[in-house]
């Protein structure tokens, strides 16, 4: 979602209320701005004014403020989908004003007057759900991919297309494109979400989706994280200079050479990844971290994904990374250098390759209905989210209770922690085996 809403930390001396601010990030361009409203922070829940009947000192109701915030979110979700190039900050500023000035048509055309096409309804669904649920840019990209698959499957689809036969044909179409079964299942779930929405809106009477569920052969993916030894090796790893040829071994022990490119980018990637591993932050929260979010030994994070307000204690390693960049002037008061997520993922794989993380990892999945086993060196499997996973796995295996870890990570669902708890238990069992063998020697 391009828009994040938050309160100014200090109250205005004139109104004794806190200003509501928005941070708009569109295609990598970020602008922070007030929107002309102030409220008592006791009536702010992190994303909305509550109750709706509340009035600020200028007499503006919470209902009016919430409606304008929703308009801004919806406007930028639509605009980002339409944009082909990066906007300027001045353009973003104009669009904030434009969104605030939008008015609802007092005489809308009833839906029954004209028959609206399937893909027009899909666009409507994406815009509505994006505004309501605060979708991140990555989520919008997922739905863009889903729309492309739908149009590839049936350019002239109607809601009636998706009876039992049509649903099966769509699933088979996805499998024939070589998608993994997990991806096929996700696209089916998106189709189901959209069709349920259409049924609630009375846009269709075709309700086969309520009763029919295809079978999916989905296997759990391995949870990729760094061991304590790997993390500390990476933390202390000195990136060779540009142009240096490094001799490495692949996962089968065969030697090869790799030339270092953009050593500075690799070094910054090392620091940012390790910071996530030392703090549990997602990439999006690390990239959005500002110096004003840090008070003493604690960070106060409003997560980009769930909007939870989390206090996270800083350990000495995290503080050391922050100290390294304390004299750097980054845009928007950021505390760390920011590399786009996709580029950081590429740098991270090269960095971990140079660090020698080449343990074979077997990944089993179903693709095109067939069971496939693939073996990759560990560095190819590591992405930015592995930093957060590393923190969770290490914290649990160190004996920190899950409920404490969940307070740091923001997990509200114990089930979401179960894969990590299983890993921690296995780590303890393996450690005890080593201990037992050592005693027998």
Image (cartoon, helix red, strand yellow):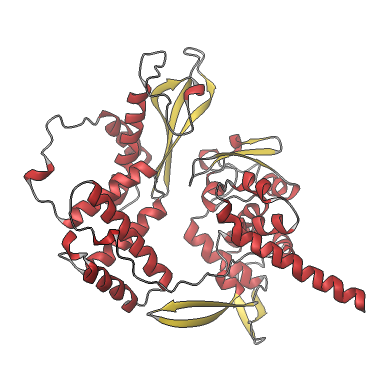
Of 350 and 313, which appears nearest the observer? 313
Identify the residue at horizontal 86%, vertical 73% (top origin): 436
Identify the residue at horizontal 18%, vertical 59% (top origin): 159
Query: As displayed, is residue 425 above or below residue 391?
Result: below
Identify the residue at horizontal 57%, vertical 70% (top origin): 222
The residue most toward the front is: 211
Of 124 and 288, which appears nearest the observer? 124
User: Where residue 137 sits in the image (x, y, percent)?
Assistant: 39, 51
Of 296 and 386, which appears nearest the observer? 386
The residue most toward the left is: 113
Residue 204 lies left or right of residue 314; in this view the side is left
User: Where residue 36 sits in the image (x, y, percent)?
Assistant: 38, 23
Residue 50 visible in this rendered orientation of the protein: yes
Work out which quarter of the rendered image holds the C terminus and state it. bottom right
Query: As displayed, is residue 35 above or below residue 159?
Result: above
User: Where residue 28 sits in the image (x, y, percent)?
Assistant: 42, 49
Residue 267 lies left or right of residue 439; in this view the side is left
Query: As displayed, is residue 368 above or below residue 185?
Result: below
Residue 67 lies left or right of residue 296; in this view the side is left
Residue 158 visible in this rendered orientation of the protein: no
């Amino acid at each position: 979602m391009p828009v994040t809403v938050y309160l100014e930390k200090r109250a205005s001396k004139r109104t004794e209320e806190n200003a509501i601010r928005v941070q708009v990030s569109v295609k990598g361009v970020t602008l922070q701005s007030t929107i002309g409203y102030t409220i008592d922070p006791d009536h702010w829940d992190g994303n909305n004014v509550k109750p709706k009947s509340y009035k600020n000192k200028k007499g503006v109701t919470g209902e009016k403020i919430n409606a304008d915030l929703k308009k801004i979110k919806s406007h930028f979700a639509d605009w980002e989908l339409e944009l082909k190039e990066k906007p300027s900050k001045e353009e973003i500023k104009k669009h904030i004003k434009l969104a605030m000035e939008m008015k609802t048509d007092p005489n809308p055309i009833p839906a029954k007057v004209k028959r609206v096409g399937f893909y027009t309804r899909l666009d409507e669904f994406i815009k509505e759900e994006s505004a309501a649920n605060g979708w991140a840019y990555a989520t919008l990209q997922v739905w863009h991919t889903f729309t492309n698959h739908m149009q590839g499957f049936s350019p002239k689809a109607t809601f009636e297309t998706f009876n039992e036969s049509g649903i099966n044909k769509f699933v088979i179409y996805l499998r024939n494109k070589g998608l993994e079964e997990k991806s096929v299942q996700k696209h089916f779930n998106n189709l189901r979400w959209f069709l349920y929405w259409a049924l609630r809106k009375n846009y269709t009477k075709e309700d086969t989706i309520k009763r029919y569920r295809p079978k999916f052969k989905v296997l759990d993916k391995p949870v990729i994280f760094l061991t304590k030894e790997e993390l500390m090796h990476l933390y202390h790893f000195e990136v060779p200079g540009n142009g240096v040829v490094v001799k490495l071994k692949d996962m089968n022990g065969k030697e090869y050479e790799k030339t270092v490119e953009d050593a500075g980018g690799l070094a910054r990637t090392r620091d940012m990844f390790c910071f996530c591993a030392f703090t549990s932050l997602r990439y999006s929260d690390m990239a959005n971290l500002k110096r004003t979010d840090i008070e003493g030994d604690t960070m106060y994070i409003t997560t980009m994904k769930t909007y939870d307000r989390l206090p996270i204690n800083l350990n000495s390693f995290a503080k050391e990374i922050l100290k390294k960049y304390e004299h750097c002037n980054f845009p928007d008061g950021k505390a760390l250098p920011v590399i786009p997520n996709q580029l950081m993922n590429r740098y991270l794989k090269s960095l971990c390759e140079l660090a020698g993380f080449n343990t074979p990892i077997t990944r089993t999945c179903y693709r095109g209905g067939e069971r496939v086993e693939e073996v990759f060196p560990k560095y190819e499997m590591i992405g930015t989210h592995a930093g957060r996973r590393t923190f969770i796995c290490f914290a649990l295996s160190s004996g920190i209770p899950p409920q404490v870890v969940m307070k740091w990570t923001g997990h509200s669902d114990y089930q979401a922690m179960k894969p990590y708890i299983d890993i921690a238990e296995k780590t303890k069992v393996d450690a005890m085996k080593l201990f037992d063998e050592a005693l027998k020697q």
